[in-house]
Image (cartoon, rainbow, N blue to C red):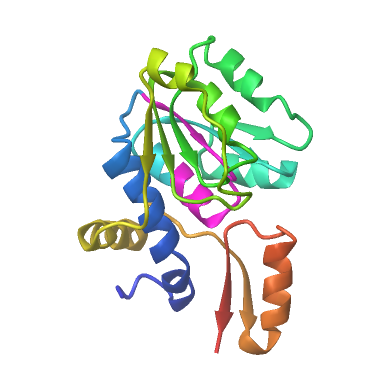
Amino acid sequence: KPAAISWTDAAAFPLTFLTAWHMLVSKAQVRADDTVLVHAGGSGVGSAAIQIARLHGARVFTTAGTDAKLAKARALGADIGLNYRTNPDWSKKVYQLTNRQGVDIVIEHVGAATWEHSIRVLRRGGRLVTCGATTGGEVRLHLQRLFFKNLEILGSTMGTKAELHRIVDLVASGDLKPMVDHVLPLTDIQEAHRILEAREAFGKVVVTP
């Protein structure tokens, strides 16, 4: 652990940033002219993906369930935030904001609740990368959209040691910043779980000994 990284940040970034980096850089091969949609911008993977996409010069859309989380996501570098609770047709909004072209990359880790929208907003030749299914793993897929639009669907889990070393350097330099919403003692583990289950956190909840 470099001295520039606190123990709290060191606990918060490895899994989420490695997962997001592998999805965007290794799998989707994000470029400076890409438009990226990041689901759940207030989550650990989501907040990491926003920063990584911006680091590579991409334009970033993100979704979240509260305006407060969207404000924090924009502060991290998201260009446009969409509240999926107040705007259930958010995929149409994305389509309009991209001149009816769609996005190049979707960072998908929500699953059933967002899957069909995610496929719909991809532009021709777009890439969807998924690493999770928090709302369910059973999804529908319109094959016509898949082959007529030449889409790619990519699965991703964690990443490589070399990628982690690169991320450590970027966190130490301040180019990437792990989001820590709460730091709680182990005796408050019940409260930590409550915060997570209530979706109150932006980023990570860190528990200390």
Q: Is residue 11 visible?
A: yes
In this rendering, position of residue 156 left or right of residue 108: left
Residue 174 shows in this picture: no
Q: Which corner quadrant holds the N terminus?
A: bottom left
Q: Which residues are magenta?
A: 34-50
Is 35 covered by the magenta stretch?
A: yes
Between 108 and 55, the residue placed more toward the observer is 108
Q: Position of residue 34 (x, y in %)?
A: 38, 25
Q: Residue at x 65, y 40 (%)?
A: 113
Q: Taking 98 as reference, is 2 above or below it? A: below
Count of marks overlaid on the render: 0
The residue shown at (45%, 57%) is 177
Figure quadrant of residue 162: bottom left
Tell me: residue 1, above or below residue 110: below
In this view, 34 is above or below 129: above
User: Residue drawn at (39%, 54%), measured in percent from left and top?
Assistant: 19
Q: Residue furthest left?
A: 162
Which quadrant holds the C terminus?
bottom right
Left or right, 147 with reference to 38: left
Q: Is residue 55 magenta?
A: no
Residue 90 percent across, percent down from the top left: 67, 26
Front in this rendered view, residue 192 or 73: 192
Identify the residue at image location x=38%, y=70%: 5
Given the current orientation, which residue lies at the most extreme top position?
99
Position of residue 20 in the picture relative to residue 41 (left or right): left
Residue 32 vertical placement versus 208 (above, below): above
Query: Which residue ends up furthest to the right in the rendered image?
Result: 86
